[in-house]
Amino acid sequence: MLRVGPPVECFIVERVNRFVVRVIVGGEARLAYINNTGRLFELLVKGRRGFCLKRESGKTDYKLFAVEERGLGAVVDTQLQMEAFEKAVERRFISWLAGCRILRRNARLGKSLIDYLLDCGGSHVYLEVKSAVLREGRYAMYPDSPSERGRKHVKALISNVRAGGRSCILFIAALPEVDSFRPNASADPELRKLLLEALQLGVDVRAIGMYYNPEDSSVYLYDENLRVEV
């Protein structure tokens, strides 16, 4: 669906801080930028194979975009997840968004910025995207730590629906071999309650599945409508 590259094989050493991971490339220690601020304890494991892109500028030599998971790759780069989502919308790979087009990115909704404003058959829909790369068996989950920002976005989407608008929250399960999504209530029980309220009030709560295939260095959409259990 979306080609990435040219990729550089790397191996995880440790997470240095929120945005930097130490990796081994060609036998040498290097620093790689990571834009996913989740804890990612299950993925950023010492010795695990990763996939980087060379950076031409910045304080790090590389950007980590995926980590090996079950023979394929978990996409940890949130920007890449969104690029793949946009490509899927453009190519009408997501049937429940087949009549939609992206009007605006980072759309203002009250005091929040929502990832997308869509035009769906003449009706405007605010759509927020969240990265779900925490695995529990066949489930992808979000968040992996308490998320005040996530709660704020769900509240904004709820307020929009209460005012007569349309809202959607989309969880991108960027992991191979999952068939369902559910909120991680143990990490953020309030967020789970907000999602349940949102669902009951008419916010569209959806999930899609994608993974990275190192064989052809491409991101693939493998499920355009994962089961959601709130």
Image (cartoon, grey):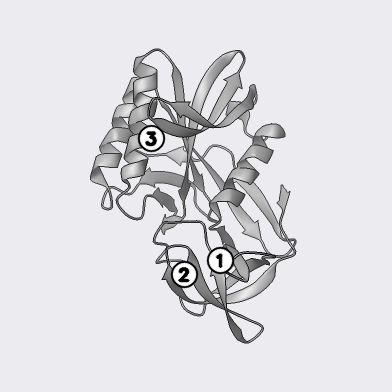
**Which residue in the protein does label 1 denote?**
67
The answer to whether one can see residue 137 in this image is no
- In depth, the one of 144 and 106 nearer the eye is 106
Which of the marked residues, 3 or 2, is nearer the chain's N terminus? Answer: 2
Image: 83 above or below 54: above
Q: CA distance from mark 2 to mark 1?
A: 8 Å
Q: Secondary structure at mark 1?
A: strand
Q: Can residue 105 be seen here?
A: yes
**Residue 223: x and y, percent?**
58, 43
Q: How far across and down, in percent of the image, does residue 220 sit?
A: 66, 50
Separation (CA) of disc 1 from disc 3:
28 Å
Residue 25's x, y, as percent?
63, 80
Which kind of residue does numbered mark 2 sit on?
Answer: Leu
Callout in the foreground (1, 3): 3
User: Counting other residues with Cα less than 10 Å from the Cα at mark 2, is it few (<14), some (14-19), or many (20 or more)?
Assistant: many
Of the numbered discs 1 and 3, the one sitting upstream in the chain is: 1
Q: Amino acid at mark 3?
A: His
Name which residue lies at 35% across and 42% down: 149
Q: Quadrant of residue 67?
A: bottom right
Give neighbour class at mark 3: few <14, some 14-19, many 20+ (Cα, 10 Å). many
Q: In the image, what residue type sits under mark 1?
A: Val
| Mark whose residue sits in front, 3 or 2 | 3
Q: Are marks 2 and 1 in contact (CB under 8 Å)?
A: yes
For the point 40% across and 32% down, the residue is: 112
Q: Which residue carries the number 2 mark?
A: 44
Mark 2, secondary structure of its residue: loop
Q: Which residue bears the numbered disc 3?
A: 153
The residue sitting at 52% across, 62% down in the picture is 34
**Up/down of 76 relative to 31, above or below:** above
Element under disc 3: helix
Using the image, tell me which numbered label, if any, was put on residue 181. Answer: none
Real-space CA distance between mark 3 and mark 2, rounded to the nearest whole angstrom: 27 Å
